[in-house]
Amino acid sequence: MTPLHDFSGYKPTWCPGCGNWGIGVAIKAALIASGLTPSSVFISFGIGCSGNMNDFINAYASHGLHGRALPVAIGFKLANHKMKTIVVAGDGDFYGEGGNHFLHACRGNHDITVFVHDNRVYGLTTGQSAPTAQKGYKSKSTPGGIIEISVDPLSLAITQGATFVSQAFAGDTPHLIDLMTKAISHKGLSLVNILQPCVTFNKINTYAYYLSRTYKLSSEYKSDDRQLALQKASEVNEERFPLGILYKQDKKSYHEQVQVLSSGTLLDSKSSIDYTELMSDFE
Amino acid sequence: MTPLHDFSGYKPTWCPGCGNWGIGVAIKAALIASGLTPSSVFISFGIGCSGNMNDFINAYASHGLHGRALPVAIGFKLANHKMKTIVVAGDGDFYGEGGNHFLHACRGNHDITVFVHDNRVYGLTTGQSAPTAQKGYKSKSTPGGIIEISVDPLSLAITQGATFVSQAFAGDTPHLIDLMTKAISHKGLSLVNILQPCVTFNKINTYAYYLSRTYKLSSEYKSDDRQLALQKASEVNEERFPLGILYKQDKKSYHEQVQVLSSGTLLDSKSSIDYTELMSDFE
Amino acid sequence: MKHFLWKIGGEAGFGILTTGLVFSKIASRLGYYVFDFIQYPSLIRGGHNTYDVGFADKPVYSLKQDIDLLVCLNQETFTQHADRLSPDSLVLYDSSEFDCVGPYKKVSVPFKKILTDLKGQVVMKNTIALGATIALLGGDINILYDLLTSQFQKKGQNIVDFNKQFAQAGYDHIQSQYSAYIKNRLEKVDNQEGLVMSGNEVFSLGCVLADCKLYVAYPMTPSSSVLSVLADWQDKTGMLARHAEDEISVINTALGGSIAGVRSAVGTSGGGFALMVETVSFAGIAEIPLVIFLSQRPGPATGMPTWTEQGDLLFAVHAGHGEFPKIVLAPGDNDEMLDLTLAAFDLADIYQTPVIMLSDMLLSESHRSISKQKVQNLIKTHKVDRGKFVLEPDVVPYKRYKITDDGISPRLVPGAKEAYYQSNSYEHLEDGHTSEEAHVRINQIDKRARKMTAYLQKHFKGPIVLGDYKNADTVFITWGSTKGAVQEARKILDEDGIKTAQLHFTYLHPLDPQIITPFFKDKKRYIAVENNSRGQFEKLLSMELGIKIKEKILRYDGRPILAEDIINTLQKNNK
Amino acid sequence: MKHFLWKIGGEAGFGILTTGLVFSKIASRLGYYVFDFIQYPSLIRGGHNTYDVGFADKPVYSLKQDIDLLVCLNQETFTQHADRLSPDSLVLYDSSEFDCVGPYKKVSVPFKKILTDLKGQVVMKNTIALGATIALLGGDINILYDLLTSQFQKKGQNIVDFNKQFAQAGYDHIQSQYSAYIKNRLEKVDNQEGLVMSGNEVFSLGCVLADCKLYVAYPMTPSSSVLSVLADWQDKTGMLARHAEDEISVINTALGGSIAGVRSAVGTSGGGFALMVETVSFAGIAEIPLVIFLSQRPGPATGMPTWTEQGDLLFAVHAGHGEFPKIVLAPGDNDEMLDLTLAAFDLADIYQTPVIMLSDMLLSESHRSISKQKVQNLIKTHKVDRGKFVLEPDVVPYKRYKITDDGISPRLVPGAKEAYYQSNSYEHLEDGHTSEEAHVRINQIDKRARKMTAYLQKHFKGPIVLGDYKNADTVFITWGSTKGAVQEARKILDEDGIKTAQLHFTYLHPLDPQIITPFFKDKKRYIAVENNSRGQFEKLLSMELGIKIKEKILRYDGRPILAEDIINTLQKNNK
Ligand SMILES: Cc1ncc(C[n+]2csc(CCOP(=O)(O)OP(=O)(O)O)c2C)c(N)n1
Ligand SMILES: Cc1ncc(C[n+]2csc(CCOP(=O)(O)OP(=O)(O)O)c2C)c(N)n1
Ligand code: SF4
Ligand code: SF4
Ligand SMILES: [Mg+2]
Ligand SMILES: [Mg+2]
């Protein structure tokens, strides 16, 4: 097994007490538990406090544009589907700026694992409301309280085709590691929405808040029941947060259905093309 | 009542037999039934065969960019919430390019009525797959059959906060007019997803296809039952299409919750500002 | 033999586009060079479509104004284009449907009656017209039969035969009724074999030849057919063509592929490109190779989607926030399209930066002849140059953004053992980690800038000189698709004894003043010819060289510049 | 009195930013002109923050290199900035925490002990430092008390008193231990009253004054504070400030508001602006007024988010596909920010087209003095000019895009009775309907172009001439925030007898060669000074005038250009 420090890059610059610390450790542990090394995984980071993890983890990585981590990951996966591909992004980044990519990637069931740091604010730009903010949340950008209700990312993922939809809490690292490891081993689009206290800007959704409002799905919970999953997911509207795998389904992932990938990765493919055939169209 | 021809602009250039003809007539009829005139409504059009309606209907209008009809409508509504505001767009436009705006506008419950021409193709660019295409649908851009499953726009709308979510069929004009009229009178975000045969490019989802696969929601159907609505919406995955109002809820619309709009529209507001107070921050 | 212009027009949605292409192929199979052009509104039906096919036994560089044979499937075709007819022009129509008033060689073909007699559908008017055309021009009807066969054979021999009848009927009608009008304009000539390809098709073929593995796009006229062609070819080429949900996804997906190590490209038009420019900037700082095919159409915004313009040059050159290296190339015809496509992929890999290929509707959608021999040679000889792309780290820890003399760092394939690195959109250290230190910033900015110094030294090409530059009094400056119209105009001007030359630019950005300035030192009349309203390339030259070209010939109504436009403006300006 | 530079540094997240601003306000309340500057990494914690406050009894144009008083809340502050200290510099620190080695006037303040004694939190170090500073500079501690009162009074009098103690402790410590070092640098001086405002705050105030009703944004450094300020003011101003889901929504929402008839604006930085450019083009063809506040930071891509650069000028000028009118303005200081903001909204309305206001991190986030009198005068006198915005149709059927001499058509408020029209992103007829006809296209392109001809005649302003241009040997060319550094440098050069002048440009695009060229006819040494790596404005001048400015002073490490940079480069180049 790879030692943890192989994955350790720079010392994180997150605020002391930030939920990102737990997530940062958990990701490394989950990568190790999944038998990966810094050379065998590709991580596409968003832009935000969350995305700053790019410097704290050793791996093949892209630290791209705010909102665009997912399409970069999709392109990478299409080119080299043998490599484990992960997205790490903030809620503003992934559900806000990048919402459209999320929606359509679910439809495709790309074999990508997504970790979203759900702190309900834009941390890096100093505390504006994220799309996950609870209705009425007051912030710099919404001093009168945000009018929109929170996005319901889990329902969105379930209804649009994602095949592994889960939620975790940054304050419960063992559970988080376990869930992350399962998400990584899942074939198809896996989402882990991670409830993450931002101790600096979000004084409402604190550790204490989540401790009293999260609960683990029971062992009897049936994660293949779509309707039940939707019910659970929508509890975000009542400020209740189920933790665990809400929904899981076995379906072919995107790259498994692409004809030209059936014989190997694009990266490895050597072309032997019958140009005569191609040219005959133009005669 | 405004005569129909007041709303009639240029003669439509849609293909003979296209579902858009029915939609075009229905919109005019619904506008009239809603007591509107070309001078009292604002329509924001997308870009597509559907959006080409800009030249066929007389009204205050914007024919903007592909995918961006909704934010233009939101801005218009915020500036002048006394004016009825409607979006007319194609499925590629609204659910594809503009998907992110759709997602977030639902959360805000903006008082806007949206008519989406769901023909499962990009008509104007000659027939590529739209995000509404059935999995496996073969088109110019997906000759091997599209790998993604269809977007489920109704579930998306319901789970993310839209308060009037409905479906109609372009081949049943009376029902369509009725639904459109109800959508227009609804306060909050209303969506009418209109199943529209594209006779030129879509040889699968024809009139006959929809005649056999659509059905009207019964009069006993309870449109305030979110769970039921979600079940109905997801029938798209089984190629069944309920028609009618799947989900309806009474909630304050966005502009009703904006403090600065409580005394009138932005357009009419006359500012009398206490600058001394503003300047005191800088002393 | 003079350049002959055949033109057909009819209602949108009734097969004009296919018919035009069939005629182009007929001319090509008979050894002619062709240059065709489609005009259609941004509607699927209800509008008016036309298709021009010019052909000659010498290369055809451009469209021409005068129509030699006009096929009118509806009356609009006649009324809209009558001003381009002369008494020598042949006009083919059905006198039972409408009349064509004027002093032309009128040829009435009973489309309606033939359709009724043979129980045909309206689209088969086209086939009748093709048969009649071949008869009028003294061509070989069997070539049309061959083409009909390949078009319909999937549907069975009866369908082939059924269609042939209409061709035959048109052909026979002319033979029997209009033999006096028959000219020998389609006799087989002895030229090297040609392929009839649109610019988009040539670009597509170039992508395949360049070993591009991932093409991502969102449909947008006039670039869309690249996606259809490459998608259609997937099983034959092994390339993956993906239609993504929006243009932002398109370019980021392609970058993901490129990061992974496969050659990737995107295609779009101005509006879609506008959505991509943030990511172009990402490719710039993170040093990710990417080929962007930008086929221009008249803007701003939705503009005139199905027409032509060269209105996005300055936008493309300056696209993306911040300062980073970018290469802009623009082919002027099919040969250049093929060569530059191959170059674009190499340059993207060598300089690890975005390369924009500028096309426009005229270049993208018109079909022209390209030498089959040339294509075959390239297939045999072309070797891709991936620059410093490496499969193993040179040193460990590996430094993705290592400072080097030419600014180019070895680029390691992700997945290589014992290494890892990030492609970083933040300013960064040599190893890729984020940094905001002043000296790091300066070093990295300078390093990236040095890549363009190296490019100018090693790969930049100055203008292609056409004509006798030394003795010319008048020098035309062209880029992109205006190349042909000026070539055509210069042929005519040369015949009139006016000494002209042409500086045709294909490597548009960055420009090397040392190479270019000498061309502007002489006392000549310089004229920039552009298909836009501002003279954008002239501005670019002024920006880089500090030289103002005073005379410009511009056209900005969505139509291509013609040789006639150039000659007329020249004469007007001379007065 | 010489420009004095006070600087404080400490760990990110520990109140440095607030403290710096409090000190700026203290200096301002005492009648000084201030100019401050923040340096912070793109992190919420864990990095190093510093805050410079320069003040003098005459206007301060720029930062300066030499630090007169350095407050070191941590050791990093000392080590990172020791090279900017001289033997005369005061260095304030806690010798129990670390040592400051070197020949400075060292002032040890027992931060740690005071915190322990008074049971304070780490942030209160700042308050101690402020108290000590005031003592050292001979200022009035009551002003600090007043500011602490307004800061904490919401939390009750005890909190106010609690905080005051720390100020007092710092103050007393100096009085008792370092009286020899006390200088009278903060005596009240008699200047007109000033407001201490950041450029973003001035822009925000300008929006209110200009009667902007809708401001839409997505947070992006260094523009974000405009959103916070305007959102915070909503109830007082009646303006609606909206944080939308992404930048594409931002600009389309603003356009929707503008179509409806209210003045609308958006704010962003380069990356967000990149996402907006497609819509800028829409505003151009549909002739929708819009003010775009683009506050630059170092790119490309994410770049260096919290630093400064002028790297987006050429991108902004050429932003958007196709050809359409666009105005680009760039203020160089707070006064210009206010005036140009008012102008921007008027110009957008008058010419019905997008107007880009270029700022940068230095201008946006630094606080400077602005005359309270000036602001009050504008509040009293400013009248907005909405151009041809009308509430009733001039004729029916109303023609939104009527062809007029100046290219400007009456713009009707939607909702007006007996009329309707569309804002069309396609090329269109005068009444707004889509058209692809050649003559319609030409007419509308020409009409839109004429708006810029009218603008050049009626509203364009040439460069502001600073200094004695006629007799100057050396002429600096500036735009935006480099204005101040050159002003400061010129003061020094003038003292050395070097004759300089400055051409400062605020109206950057389009440029009128007739007005500008005469300035470049003389045999002078012209030097472009820019905070980027390429000399973008120099390129713009070259493009429009065909004149190359040979000498450039550029800085591109994310730090602002200082007067010292200019003087040093000048001396180097002279050798
Ligand atoms: C296109 C673009 N818009 C805006 C920004 C500025 N920006 C950087 S991080 C961020 C928000 C971060 O919020 P989130 O994604 O929730 O991450 P967090 O910091 O909370 O982890 C924004 C708006 C940007 N970099 N790019
Ligand atoms: C940014 C951008 N990308 C692409 C296009 C090209 N385009 C025009 S219409 C269209 C698709 C139309 O499909 P849909 O929205 O479903 O409308 P329909 O024609 O089917 O009614 C596309 C891709 C464009 N105009 N702008
Ligand atoms: S600002 Fe919030 S999210 Fe960002 S590092 Fe600090 S606590 Fe964490
Ligand atoms: S292409 Fe399809 S959607 Fe467009 S007008 Fe024709 S039938 Fe209708
Ligand atoms: Mg967040
Ligand atoms: Mg569609």
Image (spheres, coloured by chain):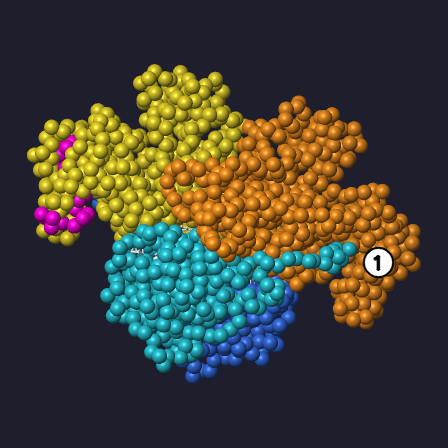
Chain colours: A blue, B cyan, C yellow, D orange
Q: Residue A229 vs residue D555: left or right?
A: left
Name the spot of residue D547 as percent of width and height, x first.
Answer: 58, 28
Is A68 situated above or below B159?
Answer: above
Q: Residue at x 11, y 32 (%)?
A: C178
The image quadrant of residue D23 is bottom right
C139 inside magenta stretch: yes
Q: Which residues are magenta?
A: C116-141
Q: Which element carries disc 1, helix, strand or loop?
A: helix
Q: Which class describes the residues within 10 Å of circle 1: few (<14), some (14-19), or many (20+)?
A: some
Mark 1, chain letter? D
- Total labels: the figure holds 1
Main SS class of the magenta portion in the image: helix
Q: Residue D154 vs residue D419: left or right?
A: right
Is D318 situated above or below D390?
Answer: above
The image quadrant of residue D460 is top right
Q: Residue C20 vs residue A120: left or right?
A: left
Q: Amino acid at mark 1?
A: Ile
> Camera-side residue: B53 or D303?
B53
Name the spot of residue C183 as percent of width and height, x first.
Answer: 15, 28
Q: Residue D1 vs residue C22: left or right?
A: right
- Residue tagged 1: D143
> Camera-side residue: C514 or B107?
B107
Q: Residue at x 79, y 47 (%)?
A: D33
- Displayed-image quarter of ligand 4: bottom left
Quarter of the picture containing the C terminus of chain C is top left
The image quadrant of residue B209 is bottom left
Is B279 situated above or below D564?
Answer: below
Q: Residue at x 72, y 51 (%)?
A: D379
